[in-house]
Amino acid sequence: MQRRILLSVGLCLFSLWAPARAAGADVSGSLAIAGNGPELVVIEKLARVFEKANPRAYVDVLWDETSKPIELVKSGQAQIAVTGKEAPGLKATPIAWDGIAVMVNLSNQTKEVTKQEVADIFTGKVKLWSELGGPETRVLILDRPANRNIRDAFERYLGIEGKIQDGAKVIGPDDKAIKTVAGTLPPLSAVTYVSLGSALEAVNSGVAVRLLPIDKVEPEEPPVKDGRYQLRRPVLLLTKKEADQIVEAFQAFALSKDGQKILDEVYIPLDQK
């Protein structure tokens, strides 16, 4: 069921963030932002701080796992779509990077994989981890929903669009995918792909999972930002090419120092100074 989240503030909020006010330029009007992926938490926070900086601005965050944000923008039901890929006829504004980590159980001692080996795992060509120097356990593939930005980027990078093994279990939220990997024990060893922010948080919290280096590059923030770790996707704001003032103001805030600081809580900002 669609969650429609209206993020607004009352006139009593006079204690506002000065940097955010500068980015927003005290605009007015209504703005609808649509999405269907894991960006919800950070977009909500951006919207809330933007509203505090602009008391006459009202932001609707429209989030539904089954929605099509790009179509909502094209039809005029939303002004901004949060996606991981560009769309014909719309303007794309990158605001952050999201690395995609390949995750296995901590007990799986497969040291590293190549891009081709990741493709072979998820298309079902690799049946046993021992084929990659790992344990004598069977590969259990945990896929992600078909309409999610992360799956689109993952399949495009590997060149396996529509080829992930039939029958693979599909898990929506990152946290559930991570728990399933951690809880899957021999004779199976699960593998999935999750947002790097969620993956690093799990590792640092002591969850029994590990992240596989790809082509000898560790899944960490610096190599994601500079492109050495190529399994990544942009976080994009898609709008009509002729945007109004409030749309441009929100984009400017997302790219400002304070907007990037908020994005840094979950994703990799464009400029980490």
Image: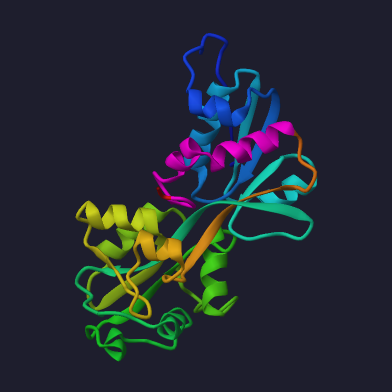
Q: How is the image coloured?
A: rainbow
Say whether residue 238 is left or right of residue 273. Answer: right
| Residue 182 is a magenta residue | no
Extreme-bottom residue of the structure: 131
**Residue 167 picture location, percent across and down:** 48, 75
The vertical placement of 147 against 137, above or below, is above
Say whether residue 81 is left or right of residue 258. Answer: right
Residue at horizontal 30%, vertical 52%? 201
**Residue 112 appears in the figure:** yes
Tell me the chief SS of the magenta region: helix
**Residue 70 picture location, percent across and down:** 70, 52
Extreme-front residue of the structure: 273
**Residue 67 picture location, percent across and down:** 65, 49
Q: Which of 69 and 57 is in front in this view?
A: 57
Report the label total.
0
When asked about the image quadrant of residue 22, the answer is top right
Q: Nearer the viewer, residue 266 or 210?
A: 266
**Residue 3 appears in the figure:** no
The vertical placement of 37 against 110, above or below, is above
When asked about the image quadrant of residue 146, the answer is bottom right
Residue at horizontal 39%, vertical 44%? 265
Residue at horizontal 67%, vertical 24%? 27
Which quadrant is the N terminus positioned in? top right
State the extent of the magenta-drawn residues as a range: 245-271
Residue at horizontal 63%, vertical 26%? 25
Q: Nearer the viewer, residue 206 or 157?
A: 157
Q: Which of 232 and 77 is in front in this view?
A: 232
| Residue 247 is a magenta residue | yes
**Residue 142 picture location, percent across and down:** 41, 68
Say whether residue 264 is left or right of residue 108. Answer: right
